[in-house]
């Protein structure tokens, strides 16, 4: 992919850091200096994309004030991808799981973009 991230604060053993660095295969849809997006390996809907910062931030709990722009950009890229997937009108869900009660499995901050089917309301 072009536009490889310039600074990638990799964390040893982190699966998403490896995907960002192309050390693990993935279906990458987008990458720039600060953000990478790729299809979830175990999709729960027709569209299931993970939008992640290239910087290793374990979860929302570790977000700092300096990350505010980065978090905004996660949403901007998610919106663009929703349009590309043709689900901007049918609708989609953006989810960030944080910690055990939310079932967070990968401790590298990521925004799930899920759409293409009707979903139930919040748990
Ligand atoms: P969490 O529960 O942490 O919010 O979500 C982690 C997500 O990452 C899950 O939906 C899971 O399917 C996805 N995932 C885990 N490992 C990989 C991987 O190696 N490649 C891709 N593309 N997705 C992964
Ligand atoms: Zn990471």
Image: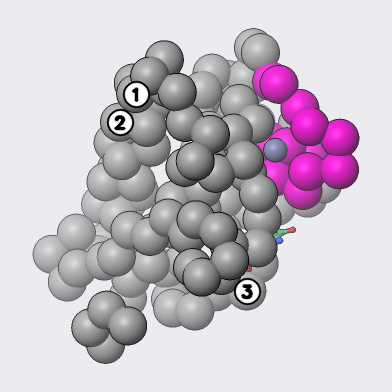
Q: Position of residue 96 (x, y in %)?
A: 42, 55
**Is 88 left or right of 47, judged from the image as shown?**
left
Range of residues picked out in magenta: 8-20
- Residue for point 38% across, 37% down: 74
Tag 1–tag 2 contact (CB < 8 Å) = yes
The residue positioned farthest toward the left in the image shown: 89
* Residue found at x 32% / y 76%: 116
Q: Work out whether residue 119 can be spotted.
A: no
**Residue 72 visible to the viewer:** yes
- Helix, strand or loop status at disc 3: loop
Q: Read off the residue under disc 1.
A: 68
Q: CA distance from mark 1 to mark 2?
A: 6 Å
- The Cα–Cα distance between marks 1 and 3, rounded to whole angstroms, is 29 Å
The verdict on label 3 being within 8 Å of ligand 1 is yes
Disc 3: CA contacts within 10 A as few (<14), some (14-19) or many (>=20): few
Residue picked out by circle 2? 72
**Tally of numbered tags:** 3
Q: Is residue 101 above or below residue 68?
A: below
**Residue 95 sits inside the magenta stretch:** no
* Mark 1 Cα shell of 10 Å, populated few (<14), some (14-19), many (≥20): few
Question: Taking 40 as reference, is 14 above or below it?
Answer: above
Q: Is residue 75 above or below residue 2?
A: below
């Amino acid at each position: 992919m072009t536009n490889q991230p310039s600074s990638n604060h990799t964390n040893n053993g982190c699966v998403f850091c490896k995907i960002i660095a192309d050390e693990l295969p993935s279906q990458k849809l987008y990458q720039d200096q600060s953000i990478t997006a790729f299809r979830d390996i175990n999709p729960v809907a027709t569209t299931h994309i993970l939008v992640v910062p290239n910087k290793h931030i374990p979860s929302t709990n570790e977000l700092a004030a300096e990350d505010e722009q980065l978090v905004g950009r996660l949403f901007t890229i998610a919106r663009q991808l929703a349009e590309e997937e043709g689900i901007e009108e049918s609708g989609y869900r953006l989810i960030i799981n944080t910690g055990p009660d939310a079932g967070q499995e990968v401790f590298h901050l990521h925004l799930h973009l899920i759409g293409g089917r009707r979903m139930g309301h919040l748990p």
